[in-house]
Image: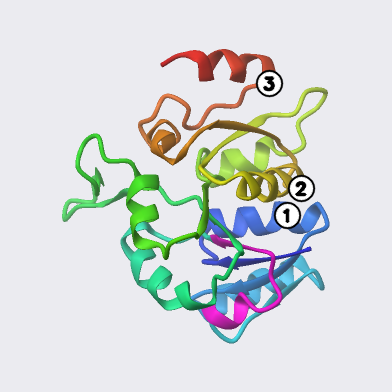
Amino acid sequence: MTTAIIGTGGIGSAIARRLASGGEALQLSSADKVSARKLAEEIGEAAVVAVDNRSALQGSDAVILALRFSVLKDVIDEIAGTLGDKSLIVPSNPVGLDAQGKVVRLLPQGQSSGETIAGWLPTGARLAMAFGTMSADLFESSSNRSPEPAVLFYVTDVARGGDVVERLIRTAGFEPMKLGGIKQSSRLEVGGDLHDLVVGPAEARLLIAVA
């Protein structure tokens, strides 16, 4: 199977390394061409650098947009016509830096990133929010935990999209667990009660039950 990853910053690179380690073929694209080439060289033959974002989608089964929230809509608009029935997975958190370098939320209180992104997509798009529930360093250090795998939460409204994201989460070395529909994505974001947690399946199920 082949996954396109658009964005090769901290979280995009971490996701790419873990998926490649699990045997996934990758097509990388980034505005930072040097970063994309260095990542592909690090990973080896499992990863190739695409000419641009649209070409990264050719032959891929899923697309991961590992981008800053502030640039997501522009990239979605760029690739929307080539998405087809591919599963779109977004790890981005709705945060940025203000003029003083302080982390600030980019959406109104009560408005989740998942609902916002869903509104940017064409009708029928297969969206899942996943891989953004941990920082890049924690994500990599928690992969393939033994004896009990760490859980990676995700949300989606699409049954088939859930199948694809669960396969990728397992490939990356985690146990997938669906939290609910896209409206629940705020629990996975920075500041949400399920963000940056490293827990096993039993504890994860208890946490999901907490409204």
Q: Label 1, on which residue?
A: 19
Q: CA distance from mark 2 to mark 3?
A: 17 Å
Q: Is residue 174 left or right of residue 206?
A: right
Q: Is residue 57 magenta?
A: yes
In the rendered image of this protein, does residue 102 appear above or below residue 12? above
Residue 66: horizontal and vertical position, in percent?
50, 59
Q: Is residue 172 left or right of residue 57?
A: right
Residue 173 in view of the camera: yes
In the rendered structure, which disc, 1 or 3, sits on the residue that comes first in sequence?
A: 1
In the rendered image of this protein, does residue 169 appear above or below residue 151? below
In the rendered image of this protein, does residue 40 appear above or below residue 171? below
- Look at 54% across and 27% down and name the residue there: 197
Q: Quadrant of residue 20?
A: bottom right
- Look at 35% across and 31% down and name the residue there: 191
Q: Label 2, on which residue?
A: 171
Q: Are marks 2 and 1 in contact (CB under 8 Å)?
A: yes
Q: Are marks 1 and 3 in contact (CB under 8 Å)?
A: no
Residue 31 numbered mark, or none? none
- Look at 53% across and 78% down and name the residue there: 53
Q: Quadrant of residue 184?
A: top left
The amino acid at mark 2 is Thr
Q: Tell which of 170 and 40 is nearer to you.
A: 170
Q: Which residues are magenta?
A: 53-64
The amino acid at mark 3 is Pro
Q: Residue furthest bottom?
A: 51
Q: Label 3, on which residue?
A: 201
Callout 2: SS: helix
